[in-house]
Image (cartoon, helix red, strand yellow):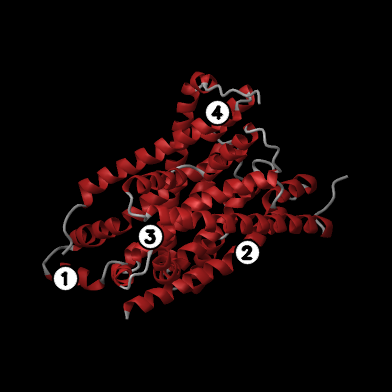
Amino acid sequence: MGYTLDFSVVWHAVPALLWGCVGTLGLALAGMTLAMVIGVAGVAARDSKAAWLRAIVIGFVEIVRNTPFLVQIFFLFFALPLIGLKLNPTATAIIALGVNGGAYAIEIIRGGVQSIHKGQVEAGYALGLHKGQVFRFIVLKPALRAIYPSLTGQFIMLTLTSSICSAVSAYELTSVAQRIESDTFRSFEVYFSVTFLYLAISWLLMLGFAVISHRFFSYPTR
Amino acid sequence: MTPHFGLPEFGFLLRGLQWTVLLTLVAFAGGCTAGLAVALLRTCGHKGVEWITRIYIGIFQGTPLLLQLFVVYYGLALTGLKLDAFVAVAIGFTVNASAFLGEIWRGAIQAVPRGQTEAAMALGLHYSSRMRDIVLPQAIRISLPATIGYLVQLIKGTSLAAIVGFIELARAGQIVSNQTFQPLLVFGVVGAMYFILCWPLSWWGSRMEARLALASQR
């Protein structure tokens, strides 16, 4: 067997790979922002009085959660131009990530809202807090605390999922890796190294989220 | 002349669907076997072994499935073995499944009340009988919703085999879409096929979860 591993091609490509990491994080961040908007709007619509609106949200969540992201991004890639949105691949990828993450965010946020008991709010008013204070201290903060682990987990999932956006050649880490691979033919070396870049990204994110959680949410509940 | 999306194209997608199902079944069967080993090692009580399995699980949870697939696919090619594309991607999905199922079952094994293990020990049962007859039957029940959830993820995940060129449902969709220039119709049908496969499982899983939650309230 005449193959010797050569990681020098990866070493030479470090700057490009780091820019790829930036691209991946930017894609995930933009996608997550859109997902949160869809999530909040979806929760409002999910519990609205109009039955047809509720049906749309339930259908949307079920369809997104039971089909592969790859098929979703291909579909959007061809569907968006038809509704007049002629976007570059990266913008398409952001919308696809937002739509996909949005379906999961609806379920997560809904769980958080449901975790606040009505009696808590009433107790807040009874203690003489005004509306803004009740919302901030009794609804928002505990709800955020309740959904924080799932939401940050979802963000990391979305970051990893964004690698699939290379299929429409959006600018992110995996497509950078694919370009290096096609220049050097060192498939294994490139993908092996990039896998560990992703691992570093997700571990750093986990660490960062743990620090934030410790700073804002470490107070006793009972 | 470009063909329209008709019965032959639909038949091609159905053959892709067959490969998706086969790939899922092979990876799930392999993943169950290897995942059981991972779960048992993860809970074996030996600090060093537990750490190694923990890192093993952490690597698969912290990296994209697509990249895992690339590494296994090109890594296997380097070994000089001439493997069929199906075998290569099946191995990739199997190792991924072993880590995720291992972690799910680790949680389930630890969720079985400690008293069960202690009672089994007091009865003089040795490790294999304790696990096989006492702990695992209860753990499997607890883990079923999450296991089904992972199965749905696996079905969706097999679509990534399309990116390394294996012709399953998603790749078949790409091919037909390129031939017919009817991407919306084709990917709509492909999406519907995945949905028909996944949705009953998701429904079954969440119903079972609700029933387990109800049972544990009593």
Q: In which image quadrant can residue A136 be found?
A: bottom left
Give left or right: position of A3 versus A214: right
Q: Position of residue A149 (x, y in %)?
A: 33, 53
Indicate the chain on which mark 1 is placed. A
The residue depicted at 53 percent of the width and 64 percent of the height is A62
Q: Say yes or no: labels 3 and 1 on the same chain.
A: no
Indicate the amino acid at tag 1: Ala
Q: Nearer the viewer, mark 3 or mark 2?
A: 3
Q: In which image quadrant can residue B188 be found?
A: bottom right
In which quadrant is the N terminus of chain A drawn?
Answer: top right
Q: Say yes or no: labels 4 and 2 on the same chain.
A: no
Between residues A21 and A5, which one lies in front from this camera angle? A5
Q: Residue B107 got which mark?
A: 3
For label 4, the residue is A189
Mark 3 or mark 2: which comes first in sequence?
3
Mark 4 or mark 1: which comes first in sequence?
1
Q: Say yes or no: labels 4 and 3 on the same chain.
A: no
Q: Say yes or no: labels 4 and 1 on the same chain.
A: yes
In which quadrant is the C terminus of chain A drawn?
Answer: bottom left
Q: Nearer the viewer, mark 4 or mark 1?
A: 4
Badge 3 element: helix
Q: Nearer the viewer, mark 1 or mark 2?
A: 2
Q: Position of residue B6 (x, y in %)?
A: 82, 58
Q: Residue B197 got which mark?
A: 2
What is the CA distance from the residue labelled 4 to the residue labelled 2?
A: 36 Å
For label 1, the residue is A123
Task: Tally the numbered discs.
Answer: 4
The residue depicted at 58 percent of the width and 42 percent of the height is B69
